[in-house]
Amino acid sequence: MKQLDKTPKPEKFAGRFEFLEHTADVYVRAFGTSIEQAYENAALAMFETMTDSGKIAQTIEETLEVEAEDQYALLYNWLEALLVKFETDGMLYSRFQICDWKETAESFRFSAKVWGEKFDPKKHPQKVGVKAVTYHLMVIIREPERVVLEFILDI
């Protein structure tokens, strides 16, 4: 596998996400004007880590349900669910729409529509393989005008 180019692409991803310095793994900071948008951008950053997300056609639409006991576990479960879809079904995604966000005292949950296509090594250049999502250095900052998510992908 090639080394990940951690240089931010301002013209392509400005305001959506950036890669932060980390010695061994991929450290991501994703942004949004809402929690839903920040989670969508976090997912895009994960797939951009793996390949050029601009080359992923949005020909297959799927729905995912994600639930967890807190917002950190929800972010973890969201990215893990997408990573499992890649590992088991060979699916890459480049568009995400989170719907029906619900927070209660007991749980956080949402449904999401995701669009993508099957991995094709001739079409999708391989960057680095993501082995897992981690809780290490995970941060969720919710402000009135924006949300910032930080997390590490084990590569």
Image (spheres, rainbow, N blue to C red):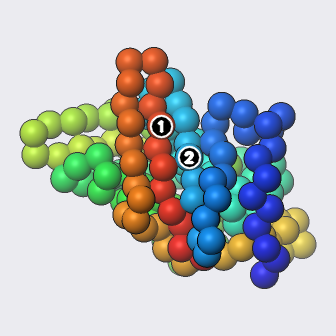
For the residues labelled 2 and 1, say whether their Cβ atoms are less than 8 Å apart: yes
The structure residue drawn at horizontal position 54% and vertical position 73%, both measured from the top left corner, is: 154
- Under circle 1, the secondary element is strand
Which residue matches tag 1? Answer: 148
Residue pointed to by mark 2:
29
Residue 153 at what x, y percent from top left? 54, 66
Question: For the residue marked with disc 2, what is the amino acid?
Answer: Arg
Residue in view at x 30 percent, y 56 percent? 73
Q: Determine crowd level at label 1: few under 14, some 14-19, many 20+ residues with C-alpha closer than 10 A.
A: many
Distance Cα–Cα, label 2 vs label 1: 7 Å
Which residue is outermost to the top?
Answer: 145
Amino acid at circle 1: Val
The numbered disc on residue 54 is: none
Location of residue 128 with respect to 78 vertically, above or below: below
List x then y, in percent, for residue 137.
Answer: 41, 59
Which residue, as the protein is rendered here, is positioned at the far bottom?
A: 1
- Vertical relation: 34 (above or below) 117: above
Q: Quadrant of the C terminus?
A: bottom right
State the image coordinates of residue 84 (x, y, percent, origin top left): 49, 71
In the image shown, does 62 or 23 lie closer to the viewer? Answer: 23
As drawn, is 140 to the left or to the right of 62? left
Residue sitting at x 75%, y 58%? 6
To which quarter of the image does residue 22 belong?
bottom right
Query: Would residue 57 be seen by someone viewing this image from the given angle?
Result: no
**Disc 2 element:** strand
Residue 94 visible here: yes
Q: Residue furthest left?
A: 105
Q: Residues within 10 Å of mark 2 (few under 14, many from 20)?
A: many
Residue 133 location in percent, x, y? 46, 67
Q: Is residue 70 above or below residue 104?
A: below
Near-viewer residue (61 or 6): 6
Q: Earlier in the sequence, mark 2 or mark 1?
A: 2
